[in-house]
Amino acid sequence: MMKRAVVLMNLGSPDSTEVKDVKCYLDEFLMDERVIDKPWLMRALLVKGIIVPFRAPKSAEAYKSIWTDQGSPLIVISEQLGKALDKEVEEPVTIAMRYGNPSPKAAYDELVQQNPDLEEVILVPMYPHYAMSSYETAVEYAKEQYKKGGYAFKLTTIKPYYDNADYLEALAESMRPYLDKEYDQILFSYHGVPERHIYKGDITGQHCLKVPNCCDVPSKAHEYCYRHQCWQTSKMVTEMLGIPKEKWGFSFQSRLGRDPWLQPYTAMRFEQLPKEGVKKLLVVCPAFVSDCLETLEEIAVEGKEIFMHNGGESFEMIPCLNVHPLWVSTMAKWIKEYATGSKEMVLS
Ligand SMILES: C=CC1=C(C)c2cc3[nH]c(cc4nc(cc5[nH]c(cc1n2)c(C)c5CCC(=O)O)C(CCC(=O)O)=C4C)c(C)c3C=C
Ligand SMILES: [Fe+2]
Ligand SMILES: [Fe+2]
């Protein structure tokens, strides 16, 4: 049998909540040309001269409010997921981050040290949807470090799984207990991206955000369209759960800067919903599979405050898949299927 290992690939967190570590993390994150896609000089002036100095102290405070004794929730949950999966599959499992630590190189070196005859690493991105600033940057960075390291093993990547039946069933199962309680609406809030990223990713050059109802009109562009993929996840999971159209909404969070991002903006919906009669709100954030700053602080704390302040009566955030047993067994199933010859989940 082939000697394989698994790397769970996430975006990463600062090393600590100290402003200097947050600055270093934000600098690495925002100097990534797949995140801020401006010419280098303009990006450097914007990031190093304006965004990082102003944002770092605020972000550090936000991180302090969610930090655990073991560290950042995103890293801690990724580690827990790695350990849980490790128990379910024969292959050793470890984690790697796009920004900060542990790097893909550290993950590869650890795996090769454990098994110098390693033949293949299966990279599992912790992002179900294809976005230049999440899935693509994480995968391309892992590939770059793989090539630089001259490793003897083969690197294989799991493709975006936003419409995969097993993933959707795990997401639906994680949501079910929350749907038993009374609620007026469930809002699907996805991490936003600039509209420019959607135009750039449109391989047809004439579909995304150009054709009316673009995300529902079949197109080759959808293979790389983040908005279409988020829309599909919401549509498919609400169908599975029997949630009628009028009981769910769709929005995008975490906008940074003044450029137009995908709309509607989540923060704006939190202000408007109570005025539209939605007083009891559930929120789910499927762009992330592990809870992080953007869910635990931006949605569960800041978002709740906005909603309640504007007349809301109850607000509950459904946790991300994290270490849900069905999510762990779903990932284990994908690994086992691949190891026994199925190519369905694999990209390259
Ligand atoms: C132009 C800015 C950004 C784009 C585009 C962007 C896309 C994007 N991000 C995620 C997932 C995460 N982002 C996280 C934090 C975060 N994101 C940005 C900016 C952009 N993200 C910043 C500046 C930060 C840092 C925190 C802050 O100051 O707000 C995180 C959380 C990490 C953590 O440590 O908990 C995640 C996860 C996706 C999925 C995405 C595009 C689809
Ligand atoms: Fe982000
Ligand atoms: Fe679209």
Image: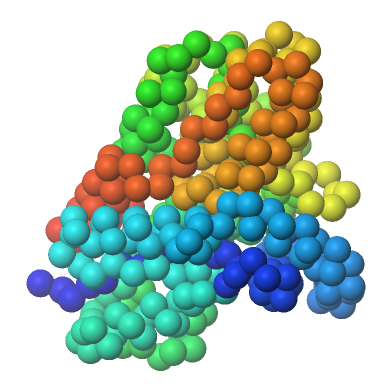
Number of labels in the image equals: 0
Furthest residue in direction top, as rendered: 277
| In the foreground, 42 or 73 | 73
Residue 3 in the image: above or below residue 295:
below
Q: In this view, does 36 lie to the left or right of 226?
A: right
Q: Is residue 156 among the parts visible in the rendering?
A: no
Residue 325 in the image: above or below residue 256:
above
Q: Is residue 106 among the parts visible in the rendering?
A: yes
Residue 345 in the image: above or below residue 35:
above
Where residue 55 sits, quadrant-wise, is bottom right
Residue found 21% across the figure and 84% down from its top: 115
Residue found 58% across the figure and 65% down from its top: 13
x%, y% of residue 90? 15, 64
x%, y% of residue 63? 64, 57
Q: In which quarter of the image is the N terminus?
A: bottom left
Residue found 29% across the figure and 85% down from its top: 112
Furthest residue in direction front, as rendered: 69
Furthest residue in direction left, as rendered: 1
Q: In this view, does 331 lie to the left or right of 261?
A: left
x%, y% of residue 273? 72, 18
